[in-house]
Image (tube, rainbow, N blue to C red):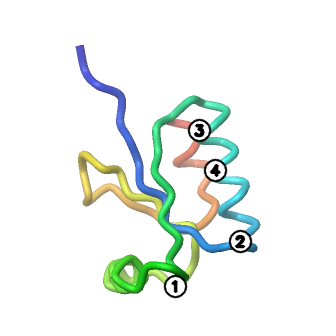
Amino acid sequence: MNKPATFIIYSKPGCGDCVRTLSIFISKKVEFTIVDVTEDPAAEAFVIGLGYRQLPVVVQAEDPNNHWSGMRLDKLVGL
């Protein structure tokens, strides 16, 4: 039996797309960890290193090459 994927969601306070993304993860009962980039400089550097300038950034924990930025309904529907 395969273990369901878990995700790391890089976010910041006041980010509307972050809140909407989190609510979809919660409604689909998908496991995730939230990282606030305003409180974690290494996380902010990681997100920038991926080439993103928009939050949220979602990274699949088991496959760090699977990541996206922003409110991506096309990705969220398949969770």
> Residue at the spot x=58%, y=73% of the render?
55
Q: Does 7 sit above or below residue 27? A: below
Which residue bears the numbered disc 2?
A: 15
Q: Secondary structure at mark 2?
A: loop
- The quadrant of the rendering that contains the N terminus is top left
Which residue bears the numbered disc 4?
A: 22
Which residue bears the numbered disc 1?
A: 53
Across and down, in percent, residue 25 comes to 59, 41
In the rendered structure, which disc, 2 or 3, sits on the residue that comes first in sequence? Answer: 2
Instruction: Tell whether label 3 touches label 4 (CB within 8 Å).
Output: no
Amino acid type, callout 1: Arg
Across and down, in percent, residue 63 comes to 24, 50
In the rendered structure, which disc, 4 or 1, sits on the residue that comes first in sequence? Answer: 4
Question: Gap between marks 1 and 2, in whole Å?
Answer: 13 Å
Amino acid type, callout 4: Leu
Amino acid type, callout 3: Val
Q: Secondary structure at mark 4?
A: helix
* Image-based side of 31 in relation to 55, left or right: left
Foreground: disc 4 or disc 3: 4
- Extreme residue toward the front, this view: 39
Q: Choose top left, top right, bottom left or bottom right for residue 20.
A: bottom right
Depth order, front residue of 66/24 = 24
Which residue bears the numbered disc 3?
A: 77
Across and down, in percent, residue 23 comes to 69, 45
Q: Secondary structure at mark 3?
A: loop
In the rendered structure, which disc, 2 or 4, sits on the residue that comes first in sequence? Answer: 2
Question: Gap between marks 4 and 3, in whole Å?
Answer: 13 Å
Q: Secondary structure at mark 1?
A: loop
Numbered-mark total: 4
Q: Which mark is residue 14?
A: none
